[in-house]
Structures are given as C-alpha cells and as structure tokens.
Amino acid sequence: MARGVCTFMIVVQVASEPVSYWPNGNAECPCINALGSPSISRPCFERADGMCYPSHYGSTGCERHDWSQTPECYGIKSESGKPQWCFSQWCYVDPNNCLRAHNPSEFFPNLTIQLTFSYETCGYVNSFSDDGAPRMRMLQDFVLKQPKGKLRVSFPGNSGTKYTIVGVPQVQPFQGIGGTNRSGSVLVFMNDMFLKYGIPWEEVPVSQRSHDFSPGSSFTACVHEVAIGNTDICWGNFWPTTPRLQLASFSTTIYYDHFYLIVKRQRSPLSLTDALIRPFRPFSSGLWIVLLLCLAWAGLTLAYEQYDGTIWDFIFNAAPIAALRGISGFNTFELSNVDLTTSGNWLTNIGLGFSVFVLTTAYTAVITSTLILQSTVAIDSLDAGIKSGLTFCVHAVIKEDLVARYPRLGPLIVPLPQGTNQLDGVMSGACDAAIVDQNYWFAARLSNDAYCDTFVRLEQTVAIIPNACPTRLQILPAISWLISDGVSAGKYSALIDEAKRNYTSAVCAEAEVTTEVHQVGVLSMAGPLLFLVITSTISVCITRIGRRAKQRTVQLKAKLKTDGDGIVSAIELSRRFTSRRLQTASSTLRKQPLPIGQFVGIANGR
C-alpha cells in the first residue's frame, strides 16, 4: 500500500514539474525571443479578447507557457478538465530556421509581425491547433469588439447550381436564414455552425464600389468587399481562383466541384443494312450457331422418341423436319405436336423451356438497349478536343486556372461571364464544347430537358476546384476550424439532399456515351445451352433403353407358347423353361458319341 502511495506522489511530481528535453528547442528548430524583440517591445501584448500577456510569453525557451498565463488553463482547477495543450511545452521559432513542424500564430491580432510557434521542437505534439475552443473564444471576442457586436456577413447573387445559394422567388422575404430572403445548402450550413458556437451575425449588402470592380461576377464583387474591409466574410460557394486569392484569404474547403467536358450528341441516320442486322446483334455469331445446333438437337431427340422406324429411316426421312421444329422452339418455349407421355419427352421439354427462357431474357435485355438510338460523340477526352482544335466555353473566372493546368487550352477557350449559359454558347455556335462543374450540369438538366437529348457528359474529370468562403484574415483560423467541424460531422452533405428536395424538381437522366453494341457470347450462355444438351441426350438414352426393353419383351412373347389370351401365365413360363432345358439336354446328347456297348444295347431294344 505504501508503494502505491509513493508511486502516485511521484507521478504527481512529474506532471507538475515536466522535464525540458530541449530547453532551447531542438537544434533543427531553435527557440527565439519573439516578443522580446526591440521592434515590438511593449509591457503588454493583448490578444483578441483584451487579455494581457507579458513579453516573455513563449519567448523563454521550451516551457508550459499557457499553464499560468492563459485563462483556459489556469481558470480550470481540476487538471483532468484542462485542455491537453495546457500540459505541453512550446516556444516561438523562426520559420526560416526550423526543420520541425511549426504553425503561424494568430494569438495577437494587433501585432505587425507574424509569429510562429512549435510544440514539436520541444518534444510535444501540437494539440492546440486541433482544439477549437480557443479559436471560438477568439472569434467571439473579436465579434464583441465590433460596433454592433455582430459579425458582418455578405452574400453574392444566386448560384448557378439552383440550390447552394437561392433567393427570391424561391425564398420569400424574411423567410430565409436570419430573417433574410436568402437560403440554400451553403448558407444554411454556415448559419447552423454560427448558431452552434453562438456567433451573432448581420447581413451587409455588397457595395456599389465592389460591383463596379467586378460587374461580371457578383462572387468576385463579394471577395472585393472582404478585401476592402466592408465585410468580414462572404457566405457562398466561392472558387478560390488565382485573381481572387490576390484579393482576400479563403477559408478551408466546404466541398469540391468536379469539372467535366460537355459535348453535343451526334446522331447518324440508320441505314437499311443496319436496320436488318441490328436485331441479330445481341448475340454473337458464335452463339447463334451454337444455339441453333442445340435447339436442333433437342428437336431431333424429341422426334426420335416418337419415331417407330429404324434409326437410319429416321435420319433420312424425319431428321430435317425435326431439327427445324427444334429451332422453332426458341419462339414458343416448347415444341409443338410432341406427345409428352414418356419421361424422355418431359425431360427434354423441361430443358428446352428453361434454356430458352434464359436466352430470351438475355436477348430482350440487350435488344432493348440496342434498338434505342445510341449517342455518339466526336471526341472522348479533352486532349482529343485540343488536338482537333475545338473551342470550349468556360466560366471566365476559372479561365486562368484551366490554362495553368492545360497550357494548350489557352487560345481555344471562349470565356463567358457569370449568368451566361455555357451550353447555350455551344448551341449558338460560339464554341464546340463546354467545361462545367457537376452542379452546373445538374442545374442545366433541371431547367431544360432538351439538354439531356442534345448533350453528353464525358467521364473524364477535367479539373477539381474547391469551394470556400472569402474571410477576413483575423478570423480565418476560427472560421476554417468551424467549417471543418461541420463538414467532418457530415452536416453539409445532409443539407445538399435537403436543398435539392426543396429548391429543385425532377432532373432528366443523362444520356450514356456509347458507340459499342453489347453482345452476349457463347461463354455467357454456356450454362443453359449445356443444360439443354444434357437433358436432350439423357432423354435419348432413356428412349433407347425403353425401346430395347420393349424389343426383348416382344421376342420373349413370340418364343413362348401361350394359350392365345395374350397373357403369359406362370404355367406357360414354366413350360417354356422346361422345354428349354430338354432342348439343351438333347443337343448335348447328340454332340457326345455313345460307347459301343450302349449302342448295341439300344439296338437290341434294351
């Protein structure tokens, strides 16, 4: 018991006085006196909530700097209730002289220099960056300092997806999020996350200055609004393109857009030869041959079971008609004019019915898709389109990013401003194909069923672009953590389905891109065909055995001396066998010569 007490005390001692394995940090990433620099020297460093920190905070090597300085640590008396990072050592480091993991600090938003900290150089894992509590506290403190005590939020125009950002008339005035007339999957997601963490917000309209800056895109105008400080964040599905990243910082990704190549379907007229051949295409030529042979064999076996002549008479006289009758069974599932009184007949018909059923099902499935006019396309990839010199309608915002990925695409791009339908550009002849994301393609098929008959989406993914929110730099870490928390919990994916149900209707199905006619081969149908052959062969064997037994019976009756009633009685059968034995004995005596004495005795009458 005493040993247990001592062990507990030792553990407590170690926990309250941690060992500094590298007091000044690892040699690959030494600690620096960041806050003690003369350029920023001051008696107190304030974080976002006004909490004051001394100049030695994080600047005296590897220590638990938050243990007695940060209220999230010293304000909790129970050690089990403290965040894990309270127990960890860290220090500020120079990012240009650090080969260990390190992170930029947003702890002091009013500093003119960028601080960098590292837990790993002190031998600890960074759990502070993964803990949302301090970040949410900083965000809440930031909001409290705003003139109205609310975070300023702006919205772009409605999105082309039809469900991520929607407004009037889908949303009635004051019926949207926060009493606005705006809604959609992204806006509802952001509003839910702000409510979860108690972040008040208010809508701030995008200024005319920003609209003038980007008259072709309300999304870029909203990014500009963040850049000039008129708003703190824009909610929506923004592509962080290169020009936009030069204006403002963006949060972590909410979801990704996959861009595809949309091309026009080409329909060639059906020739007379194609029309005649098409009904036979579901089965390969080999399968047709094997199928006809198997059906003919089934017809031969059934006809032979009813034929009374010899096998050679059957082959020369009845076999051709029987084979044709078997082939006709493909349409009727059975053979006509067949007497089903023998077990062989029944067995053959069972095999025929099952095999033809399977074959007909396969034929019907393939012919249904084959007879529908297939869509063909001039190209099957973006590279093929570039080589062919085709032009591509794209959203003007992503042109620069696409050209960076595909340099040869530059002179072939036809940029279209926001609100212009890229597919209509293809229809009008402005370009040969369009590059759009999956949500835009979804929305296009909602508004116009003709798009489904006119265009085809190729399977190749041309580009993947994230969707994020332009955010003021001071609150970027907190907003990114907030979004990551909701996305990782699956909240946004659930809102997508709900928004589609609320704001979209039935979408027309996509046309498949295929120029090949699918065929069923011999191997695919080997099972039912083999079953038919086996059952037919067994029925022939049964018939042969039955006929042989019948012939033997007739021969036996002919050799018996019956009384004319047609029934072989036991007496008649016994008389037959007795007569048989006497004939055998007499034959034996005739074959064996008699001794002379016996012969003389017989001659003398003895």
Image (cartoon, rainbow, N blue to C red):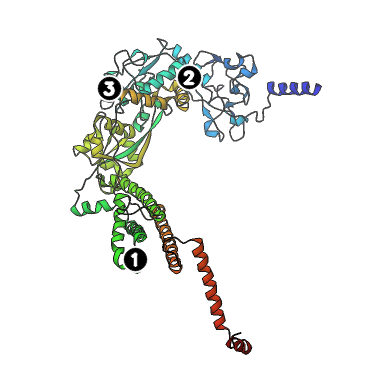
Residue 316 percent across, percent down from the top left: 30, 68
Q: Which mark is residue 246?
A: none
Mark 3–mark 2 CB contact (< 8 Å): no
Q: Residues within 10 Å of mark 3 (few under 14, many from 20)?
A: some
- Please tell me whether mark 1 or mark 2 is closer to you in this view: 1
What amino acid does circle 2 point to? Pro
Is residue 516 in view from this perspective? no
Q: Which SS class for mark 3?
A: helix
Query: In the image shown, does 356 or 390 lie closer to the viewer?
Result: 356
**Residue at x 39%, y 24% (from the top left corner):** 495
Residue matched to label 3: 211
Q: Are marks 3 and 1 in contact (CB under 8 Å)?
A: no
Q: Is residue 479 above or below residue 141?
A: below
Q: Amino acid at mark 1?
A: Gly
Alpha-carbon distance for marks 3 and 2? 29 Å
Q: Nearer the viewer, residue 237 or 126?
A: 237
The numbered disc on residue 109 is 2
Of the numbered discs 3 and 1, the one sitting upstream in the chain is 3
Query: Left or right of 276: which side holds 517?
Result: right
The image quarter containing residue 119 is: top right
- Residue 176 at what x, y percent from top left? 34, 16
Dot 1 falls on a residue whose secondary structure is loop
Which residue shows up at 19% across the image and 48% down it? 269
Asked if labels 2 and 1 touch by Cβ distance under 8 angstroms, the answer is no
Report which residue position mark 1 lands on.
309
